[in-house]
Amino acid sequence: MIRERETKTQELIRRFKYNKSAVFGLILILFLVFIAIFADFIAPNDPTPSPPELENSLKPGFWSNEGLEGYPLGTDMLGRCILSRIIFGARISLTVGFIAVGIASILGIIIGVTAGYFGKWIDSLLMRIVDIIFSFPALLLAIVIVATIGQGLDKAMIAIGIVYSPQMARIMRGSVLYIKEMEYIEAQKAIGSKNLRIIFRHVIPNSLAPVIVYGTLMMASAILDAAALGFLGLGAQPPTPEWGAMLSESRLYIVSGAWWAATFPGIAIILAVLGLNLLGDGLRDILDPRLKT
Amino acid sequence: MKTWEYIVRRLLLLIPVLIGVTIITFVISHVIPADPAIAFAGGPKAQPETIERIREELHLNEPLLVQYFYYLNDLLHLNFGKSYLESRPVLESITQYFPATFELTIFAMLISVPLGILGGIISAIRRNKLSDHITRIIAILGYSMPIFWLALMLQYLLAYQFPILPLEGRLSIGLIAPQSITGLYVIDSILTGNINTLSASLYHLILPSFTLGFATMALLLRMTRSSMLEVMGMDYVRTARAKGLSERVVIMKHALRNALIPTITVSGLQFGALLGGAVLTESIFNWPGMGRFAANAVMGLDFNSVMGFTIIVAIIYVIANLIVDLLYAVIDPRVKLGGE
């Protein structure tokens, strides 16, 4: 048994290594995780100095002679080091993405398993509710929920998690419907196992692969949407170095030529989202060859 | 089942969906807030008298079910309440701002759909060649890029650093809007024969519509590419090739026609998503549409306007979905009408 499982894992790793863009995505994400964990040691300056060093306001970075020593990506309007803020921002964005997708997965798994496993009217009812939530563009629904429950990073994470849960529920339901018909589930039923035991010991563990794949892709859009909420002033509040909020604070200075303050946080968002998208696409190709495009 | 029967059935099914939509907006506006009266009054800083008046107006002291029926009744009479930022009915504001958003969304589609399909075809035909790699990189950047960042970068490059396009707005300062017939400046300018406003409004549309449509273009490109690759491996395409048809005919007549069906479906669905994206794009380009109105309402705690905008967008989204489904049934005879 153990030997067979090993070879299967080895085969997956081999297929993963062969997928260059997935490996690139994984490296990008590991790099960002590393930065996020060791932000305190890597960042050259304090991301939120108080009082603000206004005399350093909007200084360019390494590309210009007018830049300040030790501020490679320049400073924002409050004289804060953009590079350091981006490094600390990695911590925030990755956490937001992870927790939002975590909320979406837990809700989605509960709804999806209930609908898929029990079927009948429960299934119809839950799926109609899911359909109706799909009548709202996701970002808009998140905006409305945050506008209702109040702004802040924690609220933004909850809103995004709720908005993404129907998608996860559909994915989970699909895979439960497939697993439910397997012989080993029949066997469990035949020996009289309780529903809850079957669900937790057999159904959920065997239907997690798509949750991992789509969870990775969903984390990419969660980071984008959290940045959009931050940009609208609904997510992270100042002086938190959140990438979307940094962009928003700097947008007015772009037309006076200070392009760097908004450009670099945007590039950081792209790197994180790109990494997750590439990794998610790669995982999908590996774990589900039927979907290969 | 005949086509018209299917259409009638789908229209009837619209009713429960719309009721569902109103239940969700009702829950968000009346159940989730700790005190809905405060939310509707514009936040905790509102006057106690205002809060009390709103509590009366919205029947917030009644049981929830009764509140819902009052709410539904208001919606049926298109009464979305009053906008606190603009001191007029929300419906009036939305009616005024809708054409600008509609024009922007249409142009975003006009840019993104042809570019996305063309890029997808090129990518599929020249698979694994340089042009395929380039288009795929554009595609993956397209949906990894925050729309507001793209907007700011384009503004910086093309309106500030190399000022060849206008920074914001719908018309140049000093120009008077064309006489309003449809509310779409481009159409109105053509109808009234006003060359100045026509060129100015087209000029102002370029950056915001490209920005808004970029992610859609990326998505369509990716979809067209994968469905082209799938179709090109099918037997009937191989047969067409074996018959000695030129590659051009095989691709244009046999492969593309079938590959486009999923792409068209997604384009329709993207129309609704674009309305959501308009909130960000319009506030950056200072585009006087309902997206900017909604963004201002969110920041100004104008709850009535936020909810009004949300309901309108959800209804447009649902109807767009329906139209796509109906078209799909007409275009593709393989779709079994009404088959469950």
Image (cartoon, coloured by chain):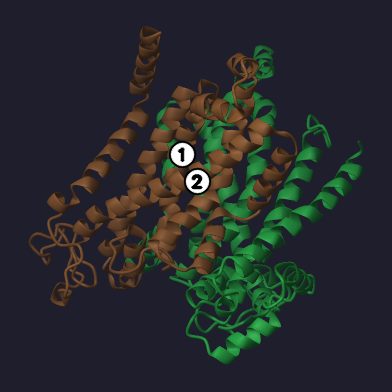
**Quick check: B26 left or right of B70?**
left
From this viewpoint, which residue is outermost toward the left? A69
The picture quadrant where one finds residue A65 is bottom left
A8 lies above or below B40: above
Name the foreground residue: B153 vs B176. B153
Q: Residues within 10 Å of mark 2 (few under 14, many from 20)?
A: many
Q: Residue B142: in sight, yes or no? A: no
Whether residue A204 is situated above or below residue A105 in the rendered picture? above
- Count residues near mark 1 (Cα–Cα under 10 Å), then give few for <14, some for 14-19, many for 20+: many
- Give the chain letter for green: B
Query: In front: A263, or A202?
Result: A202
> What residue would you read off at disc 1?
A215
Q: Quadrant of the C terminus of chain B?
A: top right
Q: Contact (CB < 8 A) between labels 2 and 1?
A: yes
The quarter in which the N terminus of chain B is drawn is: top right
Chain ID, mark 1: A
Secondary element type, mark 1:
helix
Q: Give the CA separation, mark 2 to mark 1.
A: 9 Å
Q: Colour of chain A?
A: brown
Q: Amino acid at mark 2?
A: Ala
Mark 2, mark 1: which one is toward the viewer?
Answer: 2
Q: Amino acid at mark 1?
A: Gly
- Quadrant position of residue A276: top left
Q: Which residue is mark 2?
A: A104
